[in-house]
Image (tube, grey):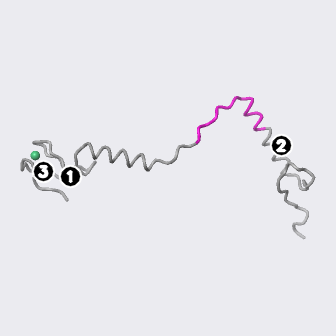
């Protein structure tokens, strides 16, 4: 709750600061929340609320990117085959021949 006057020197206090909610005495520098703890609690809060770091991106060479793209294209082509039961590289093929009957 805001105080009317400084408990240290009885100087009249203004309303709490909007940014931090602290009340600071303009005369003696008294504060209802010492700067040190306010700063450390703020830092702790922001650190705790930070989302986990995303995985660092691997630096891919253009060759590697090309390889990955062609692999993805090959996989997509395999998945598009209506009947791929003979292909062991495809995990769980969907049998489209039974659909719609
Ligand atoms: Zn004061």
User: What stretch of residues is rendered in magenta?
Assistant: 55-69
Q: Could you tell me which secondary element the residue under label 1 belongs to?
A: loop
Gap in angstroms between the C-alphas marked 3 and 1: 8 Å
Q: In percent of the image, x 26 and y 42: which residue is there?
A: 36
**Label 3 packing within 10 angstroms: few (<14), some (14-19), many (20+):** some
Question: Percent from the top left, x then y, of residue 55?
Answer: 59, 41
Quadrant including the N terminus: bottom left
Task: Name the residue nearer the viewer: 7 or 80.
Answer: 7
User: Callout 2 environment at 10 Å: few (<14), some (14 to 19), or many (20+)?
Assistant: few
Q: Residue shown at 27%/49% (left/top)?
A: 20
CA distance for labels 3 and 2? 73 Å
Say the numbered circle drawn on residue 56: none
Q: Secondary structure at mark 2?
A: helix
Position of residue 17 in the picture relative to residue 40 (left or right)? left
Q: Earlier in the sequence, mark 2 or mark 1?
A: 1
- Measuring from the top left, give residue 26's x and y in whole percent: 13, 43
- What's the CA distance linking mark 2 and mark 1? 65 Å
Q: Which mark is residue 13?
A: 3
The percent coordinates of residue 75 (x first, y second) are: 82, 46
Q: Quadrant of residue 66?
A: top right
Lower sequence index among marks 3 and 2: 3
Measured as percent of width and height from the top left, residue 40 is found at: 32, 44
Residue at the image point whose x is 91% and y is 63% from the top: 97
Whether label 3 lies within 8 Å of ligand 1 gets the answer yes
For label 1, the residue is 16
Pointer 2 residue: 74
Tag 2 near tag 1, CB within 8 Å:
no
User: Quarter of the image containing the C terminus?
Assistant: bottom right
């Amino acid at each position: 709750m805001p105080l009317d006057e400084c408990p240290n020197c009885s100087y009249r206090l203004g309303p709490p600061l909007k940014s931090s909610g602290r009340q600071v005495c303009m005369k003696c520098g008294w504060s209802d929340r010492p700067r040190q703890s306010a700063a450390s609690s703020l830092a702790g809060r922001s650190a705790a609320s930070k989302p986990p770091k995303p995985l660092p991106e691997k630096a891919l060479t253009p060759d590697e990117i090309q390889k990955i793209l062609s692999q993805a294209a090959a996989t997509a082509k395999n998945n598009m085959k209506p009947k791929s039961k003979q292909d062991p590289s495809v995990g769980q093929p969907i049998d489209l021949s039974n659909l719609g009957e």
